[in-house]
Image (cartoon, rainbow, N blue to C red):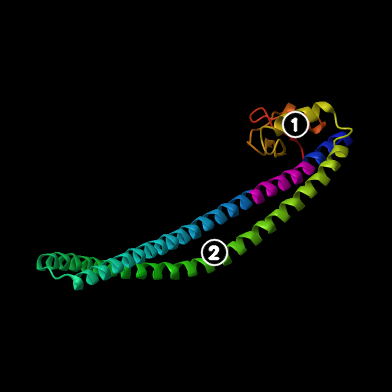
Amino acid sequence: MKSIEFQRFIDLVTFDQTLVKIERDIEKSQEIQESLMLDIERLQADFQDVKNAQLQARKAVDDKELAMKILDVKEADLKIKLAAICNQKEYKSLEKETLAVNAQRMEQEQQLLTLWNKLDGLAKTYDFKHKLYDEQAAQFQAQVEQTKNEIASLQEQLLALEAQRLEKQQHIPQEWLDMYVNMKGRVNNPVVALVGDACDACFYSVTPKDLQALRQNKMLQCKECYRLLYIA
C-alpha cells in the first residue's frame, strides 16, 4: 500500500506532466508565431520588390521621354537654322546633323515603346501582387493575433497551476524533491512506473531486492537510465 507521502509525490509528478504539456504548447505556439512573422516579412519583401521594379520602370520611361523632348527641341532648332542658311556648305553640314538627330529620335522612340510595354506589364503585376499582399497579410496578421491570444491564455493557465504546485509539494521529503528536480533537468520523463519488473523508459529489469524496496514505498533510481521508479 502506498504511503501518503509517496502518493503525494506521484500526484506531484502527474501534476507536473500537465505543466510540461502547457509549456510545450506555449513553445509550439511561439514557433508558429515566429513562422507567421517570417511569412509576413517574406510577403512584404516580395511585394516591395515588385513595387521597386515598377518605380524603376516608371523612372526609365520618364528619363527616356525627357531625352526625346530634348531631341525634339534640338531637331526643331536645326530645321529653323537650316531654313535660314544660304551657304551650300553650311546647309549640307546642318542637314547631315539634322538627319542624325532625327535617326537618334526614332531610335529613342523604339526604346520608349519597349519601356512602356515593360511598365505596362509591371503595372499589371503590381496590381495583382498588391491585392494578393493585402489578402495574405490580413490572413497572416489574424493568425498572429490568434496565436498571441492562445499564448496569453496558456501563460495564465501556467501561472495558476504553478501557484497550486507550491501546495502540492508540501509534506514531500526534500530528498525526493531534490532527486526529482535533478532528473527533471536531464530528461522529460524523470519519474516512470515499472512495467512488469522493468523500467518503462529504458526497459532495464530491476533486481528482486529493488522490487521489494519499491513495494515498501522507497525511492529508487533505475540503474540504467537513472530515472526515478515507482510501482503504479
Against 41, residue 100 (above or below) is below
- Inspect the image, locate mark 1, and give the three-letter code of the amino acid beneath it: Val
Q: Does the image show residue 1? A: no
Q: Position of residue 214 (x, y in %)?
A: 78, 31
Q: Amino acid at mark 2?
A: Tyr
The residue sitting at the left extreme is 88
Give the residues drawn in magenta, as a range.
Answer: 14-30
Image quarter of residue 92: bottom left
- Classify residue 147 by image quadrant: bottom right
CA gap between label 2 and label 1 equals 49 Å
Please give the residue where the numbered disc 2 appears in the rendered image: 133
Q: Quadrant of the N terminus?
A: top right
* Sooner in the amino-acid sequence: mark 2 or mark 1: 2
- For the image shown, how many numbered marks are present on the structure? 2
Classify 10 Å Cα crowding around label 1: few (below 14), some (14-19), many (20 and above): few
Q: Which mark is residue 181?
A: 1
Tell me the quadrant of the picture where the C terminus can be found: top right
